[in-house]
Image (cartoon, rainbow, N blue to C red):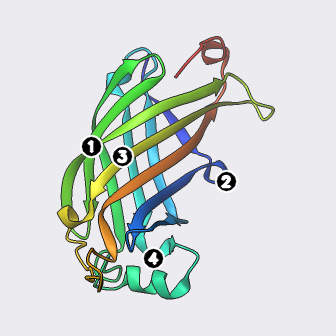
Amino acid sequence: MALVQWNFDQAHSAVEFSVRHMLVSKVRGRFTKWSGKLELDEKDISRSKLEVEIDVASIDTHEPQRDAHLRSGDFFEAEKHPKITFKSKSVTERDKDNLVVRGDLSIRGVTREVELKVERNGLVAKDPWGMRRAGFTAETTIDRKDFGVSWNQTLDQGGLAVADKVSIHIEIEATTPATDATSAQATP
């Protein structure tokens, strides 16, 4: 089977992150504008490909002052580096429900290889609109300093205002037209 193009259903997908703040809680946020390309080969998953482009200015932590600070040179430097990108280099199947996607993540002009742990959440062979629909959850943790995102502040009682480790959580729902040949198949 050849590579099949799947389209992201933006209304049912999300690119989110969390980072520990002042040693006591986690700040959660998301990027509201992103796009990408997902190509799946259901017979040979290793041929599959994923590319994502995130608009840095779309960061949303539900606090406008913090969002402005995150867009500044202290963090993402959004005017100079308006996009975060990910491009897969390999896709491997750990078991029938789990994949590992390795690829290049670029933030602030710095590119590092990262590993996404991906769970297959299911497949609908034909939804009410005649589309095949698949869901995936992907997670990874990065060290923000590896990408030049190093601003911090030492707290009076010790420790740092912002942790170095950032957890990334991605929920994807994707669709492709159903056909007689693909409707009969069980999993992407």
Give the label on residue 140, or none: 3
Which of the two discs, 1 and 3, labels the residue nearer the N terminus?
1
Which of the two discs, 3 and 2, labels the residue nearer the N terminus?
2
- Which of the two residues, 154 or 177, is positioned nearer the viewer here? 154
Identify residue for label 2: 11
Dot 2 falls on a residue whose secondary structure is helix
Callout 4 crowding tier (Cα within 10 Å): few <14, some 14–19, many ≥20? many
Callout 3 crowding tier (Cα within 10 Å): few <14, some 14–19, many ≥20? some
Eyeballing the image, is 173 above or below 84?
Answer: above
Residue depicted at 61% across the width and 26% down the height: 122
Which of the two discs, 4 and 2, labels the residue nearer the N terminus?
2
Dot 3 falls on a residue whose secondary structure is strand
Q: Picture quarter containing residue 131?
A: top right
Identify residue for label 1: 103
Type of residue at label 1? Gly
Which of the two discs, 1 and 2, labels the residue nearer the N terminus?
2
Q: CA distance from mark 1 to mark 4?
A: 23 Å
Marks counted in the figure total 4
Callout 1 crowding tier (Cα within 10 Å): few <14, some 14–19, many ≥20? many
Identify residue for label 4: 57
Residue depicted at 34% across the width and 85% down the height: 72
Eyeballing the image, is 118 above or below 55?
Answer: above
Q: Position of residue 94 (x, y in %)?
A: 35, 21
Q: Position of residue 186 (x, y in %)?
A: 60, 14
Q: CA distance from mark 1 to mark 2?
A: 25 Å
Q: CA distance from mark 3 to mark 2?
A: 22 Å
